[in-house]
Amino acid sequence: MKKIIVIAGIAVAVIAVSMVGLRMYTKSFSPQDAANYTNDNIEVSVRYGRPFKKERVIFNGLVPYDEVWRTGANEPTVFKTNVDLKIGEEVLPSGEYALFTIPGQETWKIIFNRTIPSWGVDFSGEASNDPTTQQLAVEVAPINTKNMFEQFTIAFEEMHDEVDMVLMWDQTLVVVPMIPQE
């Protein structure tokens, strides 16, 4: 009996070490980064994984059209704001959200979800977006560019009274206008 417990303990330890190693290995291909916007008492940030294009077809290839994408790699992308933000016709309350998108050829749906999963996808490879805890969703048009963005990037740009969250990858830009509600 003792021998079985020792063998089981060793097996669990090997599996745990393997999982940690696999997680570190996959993260090396899509390093974590953050984008931040600060102005007076407004703080908006995004933490996300930055995958590379690596000569792959990205949109409607690696990232299928009309399916939920975790918007980055590895852990879920986390959007945080300390003030309410008007996005489209709705207001996103201050807080922390998982950011998901549904890319499309003509429009992208940007989803802010109150539930932040521990990993960006489930065991089947599907994005871990729970529609029942969706706080806000807005549609925006993608912009096709001649510029090539090798690594997925999120940035913030200030435009008069609004803050634009810009998603860039391959030859696609997606701009999400947000107006802080002070």
Image (spheres, rainbow, N blue to C red):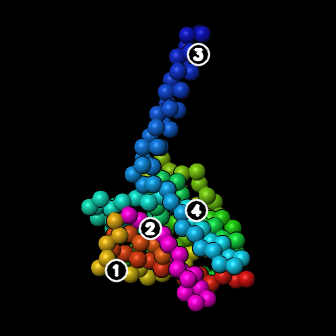
Which mark lies nearer to you, 2 or 3? 2
Q: Quadrant of residue 112?
A: bottom right
CA separation, marks 1 and 2? 15 Å
The single residue placed furthest to the bottom in the displayed view is 160
CA separation, marks 4 and 3? 40 Å
Q: Residue at x 53, y 26 (%)?
A: 13
Label drawn at residue 153: 2
Residue 155 to residue 27: above or below: below
Near mark 4 (Cα within 10 A), the count class, few <14, some 14-19 or many ≥20, is many
Near mark 3 (Cα within 10 A), the count class, few <14, some 14-19 or many ≥20, is few
Amino acid on which the number 1 mark rests in the picture: Asn
Q: Which residue is mark 1?
A: 144
| Bounds of the magenta segment | 151-165
* Of callouts 2 and 4, the N-terminal one: 4
* Of callouts 2 and 3, the N-terminal one: 3
The kind of secondary structure element at disc 1 is: strand
